[in-house]
Image: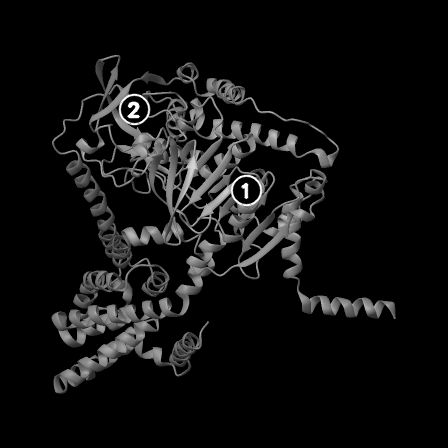
Amino acid sequence: MSLKKLLLLLVIIALFISAFVFDLTQYLSLDVLKEKQQQLNSLFAENPVSTFAIYFAIYVISTALSLPGATVLTLGAGAIFGFGWGLLLASFAASVGAFLSFLSARFILRDWVQAKFGERLDAINRGIERDGAFYLLSLRLVPLFPFFVINLVMGLTPIKAWTYYWVSQVGMLLGAAVYINAGTQLAQINSLGDVVSADLIGAFVLLGIMPIIAKFILSIVKRRKAFKGYQKPKSFDNNMVVIGAGSAGLVSAYIAAAVKAKVTLIERDKMGGDCLNTGCVPSKALLHVANVAHQARHSEHLGVKADNVQVDFKQVMQQVQDVIGKIEPHDSVERYEQLGVNVELGEARIVSPWEVEITQNGETKTITTRAIVVATGARPLVPEFEGLGNIDYLTSDNLWSLQELPERLVVLGGGPIGCELSQAFQRLGSQVTLVEMADRILGPEDQDSAELLAKQLQNDGIDLKTGHKAKRFEQHNGESLLVAEHDGKEQQIPFDRVLIALGRQANVSGFGLEELGVETDRTINTNELLQTNYPNIYACGDVVGPYQFTHVASHQAWYAAVNALFDPLKTFRVDYSVIPWVTYTSPQVANVGLTEQQAQQKNKEYEVTTYDIGELDRAIADDNAYGRVKVLTVPGKDKILGVNIVGPSAGELLAEYVLAMKHGIGLNKILGTIHSYPTLAEANKYVAGEWKRANAPQSLLNWVEKFHRWRRS
């Protein structure tokens, strides 16, 4: 805590204690007020301005210090100044005092509270930012909630100061009116119970829930406005229609069928979407074959000689298709129909909030539904480079039809897809040139993680050209060239095939979204419930973001499906608090939580603990002793903020940390967990041990050392 904050806290504590030590609170009682009423009335008649100002100051100070007696001061304002002036004084003095209390709590405690409990308060913070005015007004109108508690608690939230003041002013004005009116009849009041009756409290409670009711009414008005111009069907063919049978769509349909809803799943191409057909599955199958070839070529030092290792690329690509074929039944039409899903293969087009057209073999039919989930995925991003139209370029979509191994392959993009496929083709026998505009690969990763992978890619023989901006494509004497700019100079990079791996863009067009007025940017705009601006149309997966991972698409699908089926009875806000992701190169790069560069960008205090996988027995035995585990923790504590692993099976090792972060398990408990020997998972225990050694209580250990010395004497 800074010196300024400490001084202010001490001043507030001193003033609060002084009020009781000098028994100043005795003057804030009903008996004293009634006893001094005539004297105060005379004083006001003689000196109205100064009396008003002094009373105002006393009221503000009492409220700011959270002293008991606000009710008596409000009654007194009515008894001394009358209803009009009394209401003006009490409502403004109470609001100013509450505002000072709010600002004090915010200045002294908010940074500390948010730093310590920020992740747990994240949902509350978002709710306050969104609906804080409604909540505050409700609390101000219900006398069951102590006002000083509201002042202090609200100061710890991100509600805007001006919003806090004007809402408090409105709430204070309504609440003070009752007490001011009672104060004008002070002689008839024998106790505060005469004012604060059960009926009055009940009335205030009803008044207090009015903002919540108003919010509900506004949501109904918003829904009606969104649906204006469309005729809602009297009955529906479906509870839910899902567009897209990728990971997000399949999970959405599965959940709907599991809870016995009538659901139709529409897919225009192949069941399983990108992940099964052109993404996760084929790329990992290709990487597996490439790694086998690499190990065969580099096993002589182990005593295994595999002379003249050759790759039959056509057979490799057939193996990839065989893998897809073995997994395909998991996502097939037959399986989902057995689960109770109505599957339609055709083009889907949303024509109204409750109607979807399906075009199959030139015929179109329309089905109705209470809710729609858009899970249309994404496609490779291909910028409009000059000359690219003259090149038979590859993307992660059409790559899998390749039958000949390119002798020279240029890969544009140093992200996860570019790095994975670059390494795969290099190990299969291509000469790969990886071109990345930034000064390093894997931009979202930590610098040291990117360097560890870059070193391995270069060891594999990949020509890694970072800081090279692709400008255009040219043809010279039958040879294809990429022209890239580096350090202000143009370079020509020859190639036989080029792979564009510059990310993915959401599929937001061609489904009727634009015509309907569904709000989109680069993705479909949704709220925390995954609703679009049409309350019954939801979206999930790559078409939404912010993470384009299969497991995140499945995660979002649960929220989209449940919210679509049960809104407004029950809804859930999507949770992104613990999201893992893995780049499946060799070594793998795996993350969960904050990376170190993210922590720095957010000014988040952290402590770093690392363990060198090169020291791990199992990694040495497997001839794969390369990489490290890095854990970010709260300074001085074992709470995990983020984990980054570079090494063999990093994605598998990460699972222990995902579980730990999700359920609040710290490094101490990981250290106390038995890990089989020899396994790679021991790295997780050893990094916990490194943290423990770095955070050992040295003063206690000094005393323990003295104890053992004494026992030896």
Of the numbered discs 2 and 1, the one sitting upstream in the chain is 2
> Can you give x and y, in whole percent of width and height, for residue 282 in the image?
48, 26
Q: Residue at x 72, y 43 (%)?
A: 617
Amino acid type for the residue under numbered disc 2: Asn
Front-lying residue, 568 or 573: 573
Q: Looking at this rendering, what residue extends furthest in the front direction? A: 477
Rendering quarter of residue 43: bottom left
* Left or right for 223, reference 489: left
Mark 2 vs mark 1: in front: 1
Q: Residue at x 20, y 33 (%)?
A: 514
The secondary element bearing badge 2 is classed as: strand
Q: Which mark is residue 457?
A: 1
Rendering quarter of residue 8: bottom left
The secondary element bearing badge 1 is classed as: helix
Placement of 624 over or under 439, stated as above or below = above
> Can you give x and y, in whole percent of width and height, for residue 693 in the image?
67, 59
- To which residue does mark 2 refer? 239
Mark 2 surroundings within 10 Å by alpha-carbon count, few (fewer than 14), some (14 through 19), many (20 or more): some
* Left or right for 587, reference 439: right
Q: CA distance from mark 2 to mark 1?
A: 50 Å
Q: Is residue 218 visible?
A: yes
Placement of 385 over or under 155, stated as above or below = above
Q: Residue at x 39, y 31 (%)?
A: 395
Amino acid type for the residue under numbered disc 1: Leu
Mark 1 surroundings within 10 Å by alpha-carbon count, few (fewer than 14), some (14 through 19), many (20 or more): many
Front-lying residue, 182 or 216: 216
* Left or right for 247, reference 74: right
> Can you give x and y, in whole percent of width and height, for residue 427 in the image?
56, 33
